[in-house]
Amino acid sequence: MENEQLEENFKLCTRFLDVTYVNNKTGAEVIALQNINLSIIDGEFICIVGPSGCGKTTFLNTVVGLLKPSKGEILLDQQKIDGPGKDRAMVFQNPSLLPWRTVLENVLYGVELLKQVTAEKKKEAKEFIEMVGLKGYENHYPHELSGGMQQRVNLARALTLNPSLILLDEPFSALDAQTREFMQGELLRIWEETKKTSLFITHQIDEAVFLADRIFVFGARPGRVVEVVDVDIPRPRDLHVKRSPEFLEVVDHIWSIIEQESSKQGFDNKEK
Amino acid sequence: MTKGTIQLTQSKHKIKKAKKIKKEKKSFFISVASVLIFLLLWELASQNEWINPLFISSPIEIAQAAVLMVQEISFWENVEVSGYEFVAGFVLAILIGIPIGVLSGWNANFNAVVNPFISGLYVTPKVALLPVIIIAFGIGPASKIVIVFLMAFFPIVMSAQKAMLTLDQNLIKAARTFNASEFQIFKTIALPSTVPFLLNGIRLGIGQGLIAVVVGELFASTAGIGYQLTSNGQNLQTDRMFVGVLVITITGIILTSLLGIIERRFSSWKPENS
């Protein structure tokens, strides 16, 4: 296990991380995440999959700093995470673009909140807009863009912050199947160009296998890591990979873990 | 994502726009015809005495009266008094209403303080307070300013409040992950979100404020369009009375269309069909 290595080698580490929250209705304490120990190397693409209720989103919200761990700690570049910071940027499930701002103004929004808008940053923002394939749309408003294009803006906004770590919270789940496949390819292309450490959450196993270097499979009640799966499919990958036997083998393997996990928990994750 | 597709979508936009203009033109002509037919029927009803002309005057008589009245000094004095009362009361309603509405939507404690009064007074017919207002502020412009303020204030406050309560929580969450301060969230998300709601509140406020001027002046006054209306009515000068009504109507139309122009400027980011 990578726990044996020195912490300095890692981009992101979580150590004995517990997150609990109080249920608003019952007042009972719920353990959302229990004893999460993860280590991510610089430049790695990590996916987290698991049944609904396994605490994937809670984990991401804790890493981004919106939630506080009740035990343990998270280290990013050897610094303890305590609240949101400019070293992390999130790509949201919902595009979350300001409707009264143009594409360029939206991409600059994160930088603007940090009061770092400079001519150079603007140039960078335009470069990222081009990288995500939206050149010529800088002055369009979000309502003039399709869902996939809005998610490209969402991604460009995160990249413009030049973060250490990019967090992606099921960014393609609201897109239609065809656009989703296409965007997965686009995301990999952009990742190859930027080599940003990425933490991607999804409930779609094939999406995770296609994108990730390693996949953390989470189990539910309480949320914890069940298995870490290495994906040894060579890069660069294109969409044809999805039909190769090695790809399907990894998908099957993860399916069986999740199935086992679900039956052990006595509930069927397809319910939701 | 190539240049070709961009041009294609732009030319599509143009075709859509041209179609829209054609449609707008057509409905404009229908509206004009509808008004002209109404005026014609009115004139006929009056001349043939289908309805007693004393009640309804006639478009031609009203036009003749209008030509005479705009040459009278007293008419312009009345317009000035009413205009002053309306503008002063309305500006006060905006200056006080928007901050209170925005603050009470943003801060739960402040909302708890002011909300009982706002929701209570909102449903109270403000004209019921006129006798007291006249006693307190006299029969001069001051009492009218107060009633205009009271009637225009509530639609504006309520719209600001509502705007703040319907903020997009996804946007706020996004801003928080970008390390935004509460003030930054307020400035970059909350305030811009309120604009369409506020404009709507102001539009309702204009209608209420115009009612307030006239009712206030009808109740007790020494000058103003409402005052003139009453005295014309009492002297059975229906044509002159209708000119007064027309002045108020035209004012309302001008103000709301000015607002429409502002609205279009501020909401170029909105889909066209909304």
Image: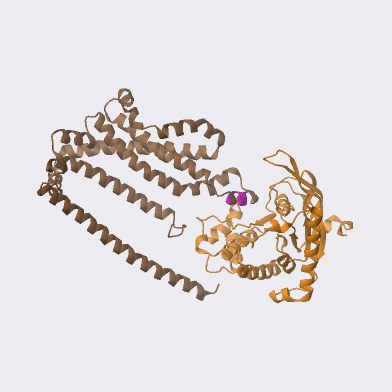
Chain colours: A orange, B brown
- Looking at the rendered image, the quarter that the C terminus of chain B falls into is bottom left
Query: Is residue A247 in the magenta section?
Result: no
Compared across the picture, whether A1 is left or right of A142 comes to: right
Residue drawn at x 45%, y 47% as measured from the top left: B197
Q: Is residue A94 left or right of residue A58?
A: left
Where B6 falls versus A110 (above or below)? below
Quarter-of-image position of residue A149: bottom right
Q: What range is drawn magenta here? A: B171-175
Is residue B198 shown left or right of residue A114? left
Farthest right residue?
Answer: A4
For the point 33% across and 51% down, the residue is B257
- Measuring 26% from the left and 61% from the top, which residue is drawn there? B29
Q: Could you tell me which quadrant the N terminus of chain B lies in? A: bottom right
Q: Position of residue A55 (x, y in %)?
A: 73, 52
Observer-nearest of B48 and A30: B48
Q: Position of residue A262 (x, y in %)?
A: 78, 57
Q: Is residue A41 visible?
A: no
From the top left corner, tell me how far across and down residue A1 is, in percent: 88, 60
